[in-house]
Amino acid sequence: FKLNNKLTRCFSQENFTTGSSKVRSPINAYYNHFKHLPLPNDKVFATYVWIDGSGINLRSKDRVLDEVPCDLSSLPRWSFDGSSCGLAKGDDSDTILIPAAIYKDPFRKNPHIIVLCETYLPDGTPTSTNFRSNCAKTLSEINNLEPWFGIEQEYTIFDSDLWPLGWPKGRGFAVINPLYSYCGNGEHVAGREIVECHARACIYSGINYTGSNAEVMKSSWEYQIGPTLGIKAADDLWLSRYLLNRIAEQFGSIISYHPKPMGKCHPGIGCHHNFSTNKMRDKDGIAVIQSFCKILCERHNEFIKNYGLGDGEENKKRLTGKFETAPYNSCTWGVADRGTAIKLKKSVVIEGKGFLEDRRPAGDCDPYRVSKMLAEICLQYNKL
Ligand code: ADP
Ligand code: MN
Ligand code: MN
Ligand code: MN
Ligand code: MN
């Protein structure tokens, strides 16, 4: 069973058509009336969220609890039909949801919650897209190193007709000039309302959301998570994707994390991972950072498979050596050069300590897989 990612959250160019946009009608007063209907104090909505069999789409369903849960262990486990999510066969499709992290619900507000879950098969093994369980295990083994992750998520906003928001309809690519869109404003950007709602929703929820900027391709944006200790960075990233998808739904727009949504003449969509351990942040940490970068490049072929959906195949389209990327088949690291796969900020070299930036992960990567790979290096070369 294989879900067609391209038709859902990941697009490839051949799926695009031009046409008139069909925008959802504004939320009406009637809906507002019910949203503000007071509920009994002991009723709490819990939205359980999980990653489906595609490895990028998220699913959710709601249940009503009789009290506000004080921690993860007081939340019930749940199950869902794995065969409808690409995670189980039809004749044995009960799939288990185990709560992993609790966030406040920015849609319904306090006391309602969103519960990020791991998925398990009935025999207790993690499903094919549950990379969190392994990631948590590896991270727990490097607790003493206090690993920090800072993630830069880029994405593209599409209109309901699957054409990028704000791009001229039916006039092809030629009129788009990417020179003015990065950190731009006015006619050079599109979808800022979504960015603003998303920022506030993330912060309200308890995600360590730390900033945003408009990206090089019009209608694409970036936000940053962290730096955050341990697995919370990846948890936050997944939940922030969920919130973004839900907010876009209200605007009649569609979010894509595809690494090269508009073909080779337009910029790609990445998900840079910044990483440090206490040794790297301490005095003379630069030596540790440099050894780390060297290993990251030596093991490039193995890493790159974990850095994008479908074992990184789509990421090949992005990592061309153009548009501030490094080529897919090689790995270089250096200072303040956006054409290297792994980058050190100039300030890190000057101060002699800090963190490194792995620029290889695709927009549709699983941060659990990336975090696990980075943590494994620390484990295998224990002097790092
Ligand atoms: P750029 O676009 O130049 O790469 P950004 O400001 O977009 O830079 O992103 C910087 C990222 O580095 C942020 O996600 C931030 O969380 C992360 N970061 C900063 N300091 C550290 C650190 N010590 N360890 C890990 N990540 C860090
Ligand atoms: Mn049913
Ligand atoms: Mn950035
Ligand atoms: Mn960027
Ligand atoms: Mn970056």
Image: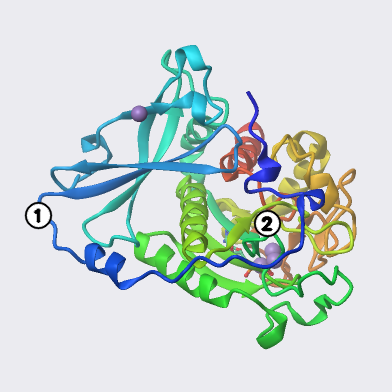
Q: Left of 39 or right of it: where is 320?
A: right
Instruction: Determine whether the residue tagged by mark 2 lies in a helix, strand or loop.
Output: strand
Amino acid marked by disc 2: His
The amino acid type found where label 1 is placed reads Pro
Q: Is residue 161 left or right of residue 245?
A: right
Q: Check the image and report above or below for 98 versus 329.
A: above
Residue pictured at 76% horizontal, 41% vertical: 295
Ligand 2 placement by image quarter: top left
Q: Give the labeled residue for mark 2.
A: 272
Residue under circle 1?
A: 40
Counting the numbered discs, the total is 2
Which quadrant, please, contains the N terminus? top right
Q: Is mark 2 within 8 Å of ligand 5?
A: yes
Q: Nearer the viewer, residue 309 or 63?
A: 63
Is any atom of residue 308 visible in this view?
no
What kind of element bears circle 1? loop
Residue 117 in percent (x, y) is at: 40, 38
Residue at the (86%, 77%) spot, across then down: 175
Q: Nearer the viewer, mark 1 or mark 2?
A: 1
- 269 over 100 or under it: above or below: below
**Would you say residue 154 is visible in this rendering?**
yes
Q: Is residue 328 left or right of residue 74?
A: right
- Disc 1 from disc 2: Cα separation: 44 Å
